[in-house]
Amino acid sequence: MTDRGENEDLVGPRESLNFLDVETGLQASQTKACFEYIRKHVLPRSIDFEQLPSHHVRYLSKNSSIRDYVDELSVCFKTKEQNLILYSFGAHIQKALTIVEILKKSLSKGQEEGADGAYKQFNRLDRFVNVVPGRNELLEKKISIPILTIVLAHPGVVEDIKGFSRQSE
């Protein structure tokens, strides 16, 4: 994985995994490691990448420019005609939602009223568990850190993604 989460071939096993019980040993403050863990372990188990043949995978971080994200993702979606798989976790989710809403507004510009829409949106909320050690085993604290995955797909590419909720327009 590159530093910015650039697109790589992510076809992987779709094993059944209960994300509620996954203890990663990661701290939420280890941003790069958490994004890498999600990309390598969570996404391949939650998305059938063969269902989205041309896709661009990108993490959304609170530490980057909204304009840069929107410009990059717009080019990928419109010019390269790639479906977008966007993910974020913990404190980064709020900015991710802002970026996605601005991106959706940008993608919808120029659409005729009543048209089929510029995209289809699918959402999934998972989590991983951060165990905070206490003075002894009994005082350990398990903290759930949410993971938000959003798929923006071109109309007609996919009607449903297993495990995801379809966003109404």
Image (spheres, rainbow, N blue to C red):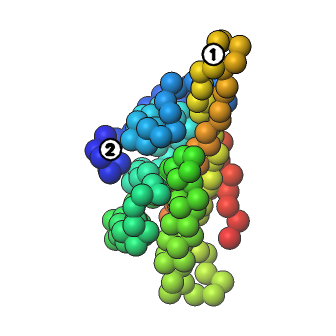
Quadrant showing the N terminus? top left
Work out whether residue 126 or residue 116 is closer to the camera in this orientation and state it.
126
* Image location (x, y in percent) of residue 11: 41, 36
On the question of residue 44 being in view, the answer is no
- How many residues crowd mark 2 within 10 Å: few (<14), some (14–19), many (20+)? few
Residue that appears at 58% across and 87% down: 112
Residue 155 placement (x, y as % from top left): 54, 66
Q: Could you tell me residue 167's position as x and y percent?
A: 67, 61
**Residue 4 — which label?**
none
Label 1 crowd (10 A; few <14 / some 14-19 / many >=20): few
The residue that appears at 43% across and 38% down in the rendered structure is 30
The residue lying toward the viewer, choosing from 103 and 52, is 103
Dot 2 falls on a residue whose secondary structure is loop
Disc 2 target residue: 8
Is residue 73 rendered to the left or right of residue 151? left
Nearest the viewer among 155 and 63 is: 63
Name the residue at 57% across, 54% down: 93
Q: Pinpoint residue 104: horizontal percent, then vertical percent.
A: 54, 72
First of labels 2, 1 by sequence position = 2
Query: Dot 1 corresponds to which residue?
Result: 135
